[in-house]
């Protein structure tokens, strides 16, 4: 997938799942659209996205 972070060993980019959540899709809707996913996959995708956005603030 050209270096994009993917869910487990699947060819589903994390960005696709995070984008769906951002646009209001429920976990159940996502699981229906991607039957190979598990609830934990969605949770981990969101945790990964949150980790990517962490910023260090240097005071000084």
Image (cartoon, rainbow, N blue to C red):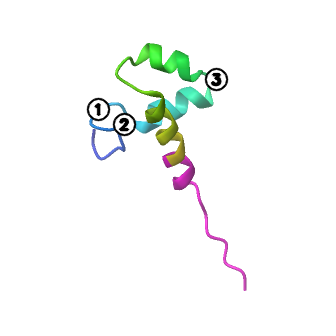
Q: CA distance from mark 1 to mark 3?
A: 23 Å
Q: Nearer the viewer, residue 41 or 16?
A: 41
Residue 10's disc is 1
Q: Position of residue 7 (x, y in %)?
A: 36, 37
User: Is 41 on the left-hand or right-hand side of 18?
Assistant: left
Residue denoted by label 3 = 24
- Which class describes the residues within 10 Å of circle 3: few (<14), some (14-19), or many (20+)? few
Residue 7's disc is 2
User: Is 5 on the left-hand or right-hand side of 32?
Assistant: left
Task: Please tell me which residue is depicted at 29% across the width and 32% down the height of the picture.
Answer: 10
Is 56 inside the magenta-drawn segment? yes
Of the numbered discs 3 and 2, the one sitting upstream in the chain is: 2
56 up-or-down from 18: above or below: below
**Helix, strand or loop: magenta stretch:** loop
Q: Secondary structure at mark 3?
A: loop
Residue 54's disc is none
Judged from this view, the residue extending furthest toward the right is 60
What span is colored magenta in the figure?
Answer: 48-60
Task: Please tell me which residue is depicted at 59% across the width and 21% down the height of the picture.
Answer: 25
In contact (CB < 8 Å): disc 1 and disc 2: yes
Of the numbered discs 1 and 3, the one sitting upstream in the chain is: 1
Q: CA distance from mark 3 to mark 2?
A: 20 Å
Q: Secondary structure at mark 2?
A: loop
Q: Secondary structure at mark 1?
A: loop
Is 5 inside the magenta-drawn segment? no
Q: Nearer the viewer, residue 20 or 27?
A: 27
Q: Position of residue 23 (x, y in %)?
A: 62, 26
User: Is 51 on the left-hand or right-hand side of 35?
Assistant: right
Q: Position of residue 6 (x, y in %)?
A: 35, 39
Residue 16 occupies which quadrant of the picture?
Answer: top left
């Amino acid at each position: 997938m050209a270096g994009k972070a993917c869910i487990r060993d699947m060819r589903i980019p994390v960005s696709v799942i995070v984008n769906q959540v951002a646009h209001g899709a429920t976990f159940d809707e996502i699981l229906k659209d991607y039957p190979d996913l598990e609830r934990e996959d969605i949770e981990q995708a969101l945790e990964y996205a949150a980790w990517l956005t962490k910023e260090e603030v240097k005071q000084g």
